[in-house]
Image (cartoon, rainbow, N blue to C red):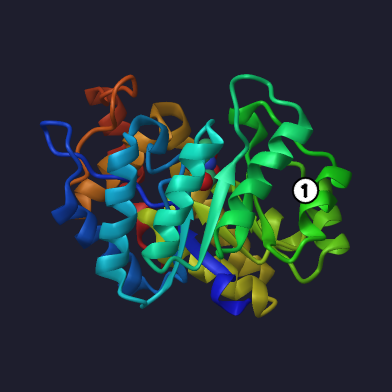
Amino acid sequence: MSKFTGIFPALLTPFKDDGTINYQELSKLLEYCIDKGVKGFYVSGSSGEAFLLSYEERKELYSFVASVVKGRCTLIGQVGCISTELSLGLAKHCEKEGYDAVSSVSPFYYKFSFDEIKKYYYTIVENTSLPMLIYNIPALTGIGFTAEQFDDFLCDDRFIGVKFTASDFFGLERIKSAHPDKIIYNGYDEMMLCGLISGADGGIGTTYNFMPEKFIKIYENYNNGDIAKARTLQSEANAIIDVLIKVGVMPGSKYLLSKLGIDMGNCRAPFKVLSDADRELLDSVFPLIETK
Ligand code: MN9
């Protein structure tokens, strides 16, 4: 399971001015994060604007990332769509491209019953060989699982864990205690240290795209028992994330990466284009990206 522990950027998608995916810059972003020592990438998730990409674009994205990474780190493909058939199609594509695991948000919008949601996940795992990581993000899907519902999945070997994007650390701790062999990823970067203390094995996050080493250091310091140092680093990260939350996390993260030399372009509409005032705020926290 060790290939799944540690720091995974929730890969952002760079766009050109004409709105198409900028593969040249994506390749730079992948190399930048690999050089800094990330454990792997979470591809086509919320941060990657998956729900603003077409089905074909998502397939192309999984393939491109695999062709650049070439086995140098772990790849998890987020395949969530609200249609079981489409999600299964994407999962089969990830399988063909040699991904290490797939992950999926719960099918959303129609308020499916738990039985329907369970059937969705089981259809994917029964028809592909890849392990599944449940993507729990109740703030965006409106669907939260109870401890018993998590058990329903995690008692099955094909489910390797949960990407836990919530601030319910009691819930996270209970899942990890009940399933110590499963992988739990902390989802909110600004609460990474809280997640680790509650039992998380790593993190998947947007801001790891532009400050991977800060989170690698939080993770290492936590594991070495230097909680004070981990907290200092979390606090530096949070001063940046505070501004990102004000200006828009994804447009803001893309701007910071562009300042680091990777031209990420804008997010797809309806995401906003940053104002001059937003950029000034981001400029003021930019120096904090550097990790001492
Ligand atoms: O993947 C991300 N969540 C969303 C996890 O994209 C909704 C987080 O990394 C947040 O973007 C981050 C800022 O709130 O913690």
Assign the N terminus to one quadrant of the image: bottom right
Q: Is residue 49 above or below residue 8?
A: above
Where 130 falls versus 46 (above or below)? below
**Residue 192 visible in this rendered orientation of the protein:** no
**Left or right of 227: which side holds 32?**
left
Q: Position of residue 127 (x, y in %)?
A: 57, 55
Q: Foreground: 290 or 139?
A: 139
Q: Is residue 149 left or right of residue 73?
A: right
Q: Quadrant of residue 182?
A: bottom right
- Categorize mark 1 by other alpha carbons within 10 Å: few (<14), some (14-19), many (20+): some
**What residue is drawn where x is 18% and y is 52%?**
23
Q: Quick check: 86 above or below 192? A: above
- State the image coordinates of residue 225 (x, y, percent, origin top left): 70, 77
Residue at figure coordinates x 31%, y 34% from the top left = 54
**Tag 1: amino acid:** Phe
Residue that appears at 74% across and 62% down: 197
| Residue at image location 70% in from the left, 54% down from the top | 194
Q: Specify whether 48 is left or right of 177.
A: left
Q: Nearer the viewer, residue 142 or 167?
A: 142
* On-image quarter of the C terminus: bottom left
- What residue would you read off at disc 1? 169
Q: x%, y% of residue 174?
A: 86, 54
Instruction: Residue 200: tell me if it is visible.
Output: yes
Q: Element type at marker 1?
A: helix
Front position in the image: 282 or 159: 159
Q: Is mark 1 within 8 Å of ligand 1?
A: no
Name the outermost residue toward the left.
18
Residue 263, percent from left and from top: 17, 47
Image side of residue 32 versus residue 156, left or right: left
- Who is closer to the viewer here, 196 or 94? 94
